Amino acid sequence: MRAKIYISILCLCAALCVRATEVVDTTATELREVVVTATRPPVEVIPVQRLGGEELRRLNSQSVADALRYFSGVQVKDYGGVGGIKTVNIRSMGTHHTGVVYDGVELGNAQNGQIDLGQFSLDNVEAISLYNGQKSEILQPARDFGSAGTIYIRTRTPRFAPGETYHVRGTVRTGSFDLINPSALVELRLGRRVNASLSAEWVNSSGKYKFRYRRVNPAGEVAYDTTATRQNGDINALRTELNFNGDIDGGEWHFKVYHYDSERGIPGAIVNNVWRRGERVWDNNSFAQGSFTKNIGRFTTLANVKYSFYRTHYVNNDDKQIKIDNLYRQREFYISTANEYQIMPQWRVSASYDFQWNALDADMYNFARPDRFSHMLSAATSLNLKRFKAQASAMGTFIHDKLRGQQSPADKHVFTPAIYLSGNPLRNRDFSVRAFVKRSFRMPTFNDLYYADMGNSKLNPERVTQYNLGLLYEHSGKGFISAARVSADGYINLVKDKIVAYPKGQQFRWTMLNLGVVDIKGVDISALITVNPADRLFVTLRGQYTFQRAIDVTNPADNYYRDQIPYIPRHSGSAVLNATWRLWNFNCSYIYVGERYNQQENIRYNYTQPWYTTDLSLSRDFTFKRVKLRALLEVNNVFAQDYDVIINYPMPKRNYRLTLTVEI
């Protein structure tokens, strides 16, 4: 039945393509060459890393999480396979402190606070930006001021040349693990100021791959060393997205409907010679959101509204474990208004208010069924002088939780200010210095507070204080070196009231407590250079390096006091080499993650060895009149390295992908 639904949707996309071709004038017109020039955008007040356009498409990445591996200061937790859960941690502060904004509105998950970025494909993504702190704009929703770091995902917006009324793109991807991944994108001009797009993608894979399982005991002796095939890592997922965009005098509006439906196996950890698990999960996630921006003289207003419904069905049929069959339903309503006023050309102020309602229901006995009402208020100001820029903000958050049939916990409120500075002290526009101080927090999730036999309704929000000092050099020109960029940021993050799971004294009985204090110090370095050594040959080299010392300073009596926290490497980095010549494109990507520990104590038994991968890709573009084709061959993990991102979750060895894209 589900396969019929998938085929029907793909047929719908094909029908839209046919309809689009019917309304287009087939008269051929020769267009003269148009040269577009623009001034260089201003230097960001807040440190930002960005991948977009052709550079993003060249990376050997299938999901948003894969692309984020090339950013400095980022750790991606990958549980293996095409359908494995992928979460992101920025500068060792934890996944919950990372906000993910999808086309201007933040994604939410009040149940566990984690966004699985593996569910978001790159097929219709135009750019990904990562800000440490917050965005370099004060006209934004109040909620965007609250995260310690934010990932902004911007999907493709249709752009039509004169005379164009449609765009069609179809992609077919296949490769290792029995991968079948077709996708389609249709863009239509509905009027002079209105356009629409429909994107659909289907992913099907067995998730089976060979891996080597080798473990050494504390004495240094080999305990296990065998080769097996990863089981129960299959995925069958469908993503559809419908967008409407419009321009008005002095503003614009956008409306989006998103749906993701998947059935996945959860491969589980490889422990005690157990290779197969009986866990499966069905995700049915939908949301609709709209945004409106209008400029009236010196005044600009921004409004957002969103409703989402997430349905998760989890089943564990493992004969050696307790049988579980749970259904979770999560709902969210969100509305935001942000307003900015320009006092002077160099000075702006803004104020924002957000309201958010979250509810969680489950078919579990005596479940708390919480409702959360969140009110967020923010005020911000920015000053932009010739050689100096400053931005300051303050946010107040007020949380009220209501439990059905139980006593509701006390309300919680948090105040979080931030100050950002940037300048050109040497009177050289290519060189700048930046600094910021920010306080942020993460609210305990519904699982932290109300999960049966584990939750603690008296938890306090987890708080972070961030300090950052950085340097940036950026130059562009038309000579041999067409672009160069070097940045270095040193930072200190102090995490207080860290929420941790703590044993109650009985086996399998845990509770959540505010026990953790983490001291984080680190350095992020990134560099990029593009050279033009010959006619129509461009070579770009991009590199990132991160040093992090993230230690637990909770209690001097603990055995792990001042030890590096789990899964945070001291050293990590990446390098990307790209060469473009005529219609050919070659890309080589390298990722390195240093040694780390999988438990709190930094002892030999918990040691996890470093890992690195090298990925290669080669593509060729073809053009036949109005039809553009691209053939892409990818070889990932070229040297077939055996590695785990998360201990006991082995990753694939060498694997391949072949992609064919047709665009009209």
Image (cartoon, rainbow, N blue to C red):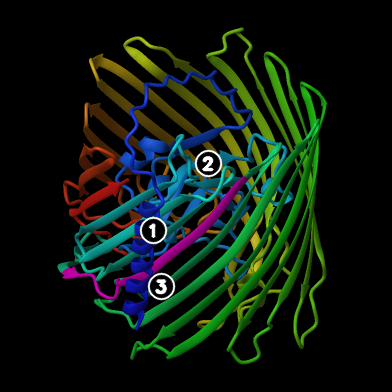
Q: Locate residue 500 relative to residue 121 in the image: left or right.
A: right
**x then y, percent, for residue 13:** 37, 62
Residue behind mark 2: 130
Q: Position of residue 47 (x, y in %)?
A: 57, 32
Q: Which residue is mark 1?
A: 19
Q: Which residue is mark 3?
A: 262
Mark number displayed over residue 365: none
Residue depicted at x 53% and y 55% = 243
How dense is the environment of label 3, judged by Cα within 10 Å: few (below 14), some, or many (20 and up)?
many
Q: Are marks 1 and 2 in contact (CB under 8 Å)?
A: no
Q: Picture coordinates of residue 348 (x, y %)?
A: 79, 30
65 up-or-down from 240: above or below: above
Mark 3 or 1: the one toward you: 1
Q: Which residues are magenta?
A: 228-246
Residue with the most extreme right position = 343
Looking at the image, is 662 positioned above or below residue 406? above
Disc 2 marks which amino acid?
Leu
Most distant residue in the top direction = 427
Quarter assignment of residue 48: top right
Location of the C terminus by quadrant is: top left
Q: Position of residue 162 (x, y in %)?
A: 46, 34
Please name which of the two marks, 2 or 3, marks the residue nearer to the observer: 3
- Name which residue type carries label 3: Ser
Say whether residue 245 is magenta: yes
Q: Main secondary structure of the magenta part?
A: strand
Comparing 363 with 227, the one in front is 363
Query: Which residue corresponds to the image point at 32% horizontal and 64% vertical from the top-left?
Result: 649
Mark 1 crowd level (few <14, some 14–19, many ≥20, 10 Å Cα): few
Please, what secondary structure does the residue beneath circle 2 have?
strand
- Closest to the camera, between mark 1 and mark 2, is 1
Residue 554 visible in the shown view? no
